[in-house]
Image (cartoon, grey):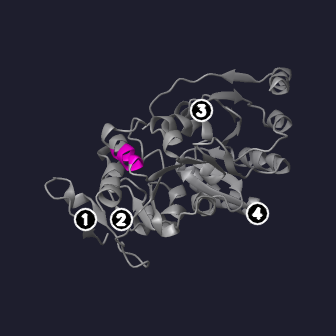
Amino acid sequence: MANTVAKRKKLGYDSISREPAKAPGKQTLLAGLKGTQTSCRVQSLRNSRGGIQRMEYKVIVLDLDGTLTNRDKVITPKTKEALMKAQAMGKIVVLASGRPTMGVMPLAEELELKRYGGYILSFNGGMIVNCKTGKVVFESQLPPEINSKIIDQSVEHGVDIITYEGDKIIASDARYQYIDLESRVNHMDVIEIKDRSKMKEYLTFQVPKFILTDDGDYLAMVEPKVKAAMGKNYSVYRSDPYYLEILPKGIDKAKSLERFLEVTGYRQEELIACGDGYNDLSMIKFAGLGVAMENAVLPVRQAADYITLSNNEDGVAHVVEKFMITM
């Protein structure tokens, strides 16, 4: 760490602190929430896997932003109560996020995953942490020799860039709205390196992923160009309209869940996965029960076995109560 600090000072990089803040802003079968006015909006989808099977689900895998947390990036009391009850019954909670591990930890602590033996799948599956032991049971990072090529892609397409070092974010412009958002949501400080040649000079080590960031409409045009440039040895996809992620090949939430099953011995059909974003699509398809939030993007809703209420209406609590507590 001393060498890292000295290196930052030598190259003239600044560490910028951030305070927590809010983010900016079917063909169906009725699920039947009797006695509620929202019942007509909680729906299930039958797909090629043959519909929803009634069985004992032992693990629930939760995306964070737009799924577990509401618009204010907090877990509502009802959702927390349902998850704590499920854990007391022996169910396992897994937090699966594109966030860095440091950004997931506060929510893991709030839900007492260490006490109940839960897991964190961070960096879109690039790292798996056993919360009870604190042990990293899987980790995959980008080779350092690819860093310069990815930085060049940010220059070629005129977009900003993010990566990570320990408990810090490294980025091209700390005050750019989507970099500022990443800092605030994860409660991590930013090392700002505006000069991309200096960024190349600094980033001589492995990192878990890069994010290229810009407005969603423009990034949609950039995405296929970056995919073509990176080739088949890397995963390139958007986790949000304004975040284009570049990770090692084979790193996504579904692949991470496969590794989770190998480590824990649970079966695929015992998993529930809940999500709303593009990077949740693979795990929605993989899980025994794939659940889309009502606020999910269209591809996720189309792939899901079940559509629950939105993240602002305790959609996760409804799933836990319906499929884990009362079954």
The residue furthest left is 35
Could you say which quadrant of the image residue 160 lies in? top right
Badge 4 amino acid: Asn
Badge 1 amino acid: Ala
The residue that mark 4 highlights is 233
Residue shown at 55% from the left, 39% from the top: 104
Q: Quadrant where the C terminus lies?
A: bottom left
Q: Are marks 3 and 4 in contact (CB under 8 Å)?
A: no
Q: Earlier in the sequence, mark 2 or mark 3?
A: 3
Residue shown at 50% from the left, 35% from the top: 109
**Is 240 on the left or on the right of 2, as rendered?**
left
Counting from the top left corner in percent of width and height, residue 178 is at 56, 37
SS label for mark 4: loop
Number of the front mark, 3 or 4: 4
Most foreground residue, 196 or 300: 300
Q: Which mark is residue 176?
A: 3
The residue that mark 2 highlights is 306
Q: CA distance from mark 1 to mark 3?
A: 42 Å
Disc 3: CA contacts within 10 A as few (<14), some (14-19) or many (>=20): few
Q: CA distance from mark 3 to mark 4?
A: 30 Å
Q: Which residues are magenta?
A: 82-88
Disc 1: CA contacts within 10 A as few (<14), some (14-19) or many (>=20): some
The residue that mark 1 highlights is 31
Q: CA distance from mark 4 to mark 2?
A: 33 Å
In reply to whether residue 181 is colored magenta, the answer given is: no
Q: Are marks 1 and 2 in contact (CB under 8 Å)?
A: yes
